[in-house]
């Protein structure tokens, strides 16, 4: 059941019933497709459906983000060894990455993995860090883990465990030569983190393209701004509520 946030808008940040969880997750698939942050029929999102993360919802293999409906999402058991043998098996890389992170990291309730244009370009640079050059990039100051051990597609439990260890208690994993992964306690927070991370990477890559020196904020300013972002949690709730309002008007079948 949807609760009401202090802003007077529906609170989609902590949907606890499976129906609400499915609708929230389906909505952000549609949203990221609208933003052009999908890639073919690849990439994957998941949302823990049990307290221990053993069971989680995830998109079916081969379905375009723009067509995902709440009923399409598969309920998967991370401890079921037969999962990949079934006729409706999920994408194997999604299985190995998401099942291990959900089981190992309690804060990773919602996991989003994308290859968005600017984050992926930044992941290809020798230095994939994000210096604090505006308030969006400052959101991630000292808050991004980096994986520089890419050896091909993630097709083993060991790879999922390695990525979970790299991510640790952070919310964003910059995956070198690959893309980005976001893990957060709620769908709203994960969506908002991914959105602002890609915007930060876009700003940085445009600034790099000028060839001119960056105006980098002092560490104390960047850290203070990052803390302010952490206290600005209502933004993520409002962001998801507005995304759902747009889809309710224009693509209501995401709830089916």
Image (cartoon, rainbow, N blue to C red):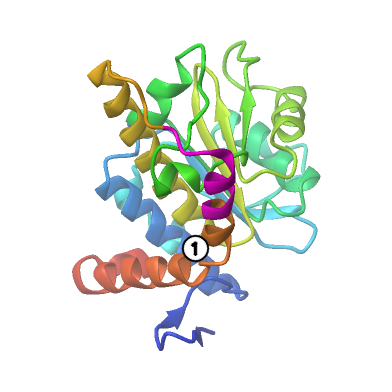
- Which residue does the image show at 69% across and 36% down from the upper left? 167
Q: What stretch is highlighted in magenta?
A: 216-225
Q: Indicate whether 190 appears above or below 3.
A: above
Confirm whether residue 196 shows in the render. yes
Q: Mark 1 points at which residue?
A: 188
Is 141 colored magenta in this rendering?
Answer: no
At mark 1, the secondary structure is: helix
Confirm whether residue 79 shows in the render. no
Q: Pick the quarter of the image with the N terminus.
A: bottom right
What is the chief secondary structure element of the magenta stretch?
helix
- Which residue does the image show at 45% across and 46% down from the upper left? 194
Q: In which quarter of the image is residue 90?
A: top right
Q: Indicate whether 62 appears above or below 250.
A: above
Q: In which quarter of the image is residue 154?
A: top right
- Which residue does the image show at 54% across and 33% down from the upper left? 91
Label 1 crowd (10 A; few <14 / some 14-19 / many >=20): many
Looking at this view, is 158 or 213 the one in front?
Answer: 213
Taking the image as shown, residue 20 lies to the left or right of residue 251, namely right
Looking at this view, is 63 or 234 the one in front?
Answer: 234
Is 220 colored magenta in this rendering?
Answer: yes
Q: Indicate whether 129 appears above or below 108.
A: above
x, y percent for residue 224: 57, 54
- Which residue does the image show at 35% across and 42% down from the upper left? 199
Taking the image as shown, residue 233 lies to the left or right of residue 65, namely right
Q: Pick the quarter of the image with the C terminus.
A: bottom left
x, y percent for residue 207: 29, 27
Looking at this view, is 88 or 182 the one in front?
Answer: 182
x, y percent for residue 244: 34, 70
């Amino acid at each position: 059941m949807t609760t009401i946030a202090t802003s007077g808008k529906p609170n989609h940040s902590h949907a606890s019933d499976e129906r609400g969880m499915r609708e929230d997750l389906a909505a952000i698939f549609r949203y990221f497709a609208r933003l052009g942050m999908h890639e073919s029929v690849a990439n994957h999102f998941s949302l823990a459906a049990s307290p221990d993360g053993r069971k989680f919802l995830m998109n079916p293999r081969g379905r375009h983000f723009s067509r995902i409906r709440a009923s399409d999402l598969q309920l998967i058991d991370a401890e079921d060894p037969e999962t990949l043998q079934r006729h409706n098996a999920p994408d194997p890389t999604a299985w190995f990455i998401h099942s291990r992170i959900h089981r190992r990291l309690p804060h990773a309730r919602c996991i989003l993995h994308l290859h968005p244009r600017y984050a992926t370009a930044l992941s290809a640079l020798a230095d994939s860090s994000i210096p604090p050059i505006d308030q969006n990039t400052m959101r991630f100051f000292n808050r991004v883990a980096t994986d520089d051990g890419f050896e091909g597609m993630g097709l083993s439990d060991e790879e999922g465990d390695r990525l979970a260890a790299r991510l640790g208690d952070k919310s964003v994993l910059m995956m070198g030569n690959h893309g980005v992964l976001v893990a957060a306690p709620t769908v709203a927070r994960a969506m908002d983190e991914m959105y602002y991370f890609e915007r930060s990477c876009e700003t940085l890559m445009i600034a790099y393209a000028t060839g001119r020196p960056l105006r980098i904020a002092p560490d104390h300013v960047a850290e203070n701004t990052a803390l302010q972002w952490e206290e600005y949690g209502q933004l993520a709730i409002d962001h998801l509520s507005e995304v759902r309002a747009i889809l309710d008007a224009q693509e209501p079948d995401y709830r089916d």
